[in-house]
């Protein structure tokens, strides 16, 4: 019984911690728009995220047009995906 009690206290201590209040991290807020050059420097995991594409579109008002965005995707994003070794959507890997 004593072993169970000690284990329970240890578990409770690990869950609760030392009693210090957690310090809040810095508030980052929304991320700023991205230039194409900044986008090219991002890690691959972040580069092709939908929110990253939104940031690209925010930077250049011309990219708000669907026609211009589609052209940008074909001329800039698809070649960059190939360079990064990521197949285009619908294409087999390898």
Image: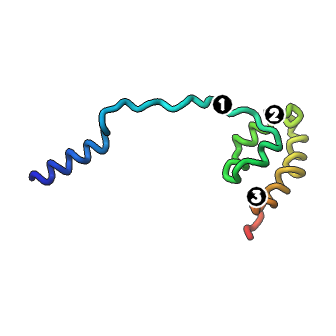
Q: Nearer the viewer, mark 3 or mark 1?
A: 1
Q: Quadrant of residue 64?
A: top right
Locate residue 35, reporting x and y percent. Answer: 81, 39
Q: Earlier in the sequence, mark 3 or mark 1?
A: 1
Residue contact at pointers 3 and 1, CB within 8 angstroms: no
Q: Which mark is residue 89?
A: 3
Locate residue 59, reporting x and y percent. Answer: 81, 33
Q: CA distance from mark 3 to mark 1?
A: 28 Å
Seen at 67% across and 52% down, the residue is 45
Q: Is residue 30 left or right of residue 14?
A: right
Can you identify the residue that label 1 sits on?
Answer: 30
Residue contact at pointers 2 and 1, CB within 8 angstroms: no
Locate residue 61, reporting x and y percent. Answer: 86, 31
Neighbour tally class for label 2: few under 14, some 14-19, many 20 plus, Cα within 10 Å: some
**Where is 51 relative to 25, above or below?**
below
Figure disc tally: 3
Q: Which mark is residue 59?
A: 2
The front one of 25 and 74 is 25
Q: Is residue 6 left or right of residue 23?
A: left
Q: Quadrant of residue 89?
A: bottom right
């Amino acid at each position: 019984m004593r072993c169970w009690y000690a284990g329970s206290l240890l578990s409770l201590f690990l869950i609760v911690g030392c009693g210090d209040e957690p310090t809040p991290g810095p508030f980052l807020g929304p991320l700023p728009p991205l230039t194409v050059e900044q986008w090219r420097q991002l890690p691959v995991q972040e580069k092709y995220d939908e929110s990253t594409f939104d940031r690209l579109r925010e930077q250049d008002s011309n990219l708000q047009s669907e026609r211009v965005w589609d052209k940008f995707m074909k001329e800039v994003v698809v070649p960059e995906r190939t360079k990064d070794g990521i197949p285009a959507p619908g294409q087999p890997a390898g």
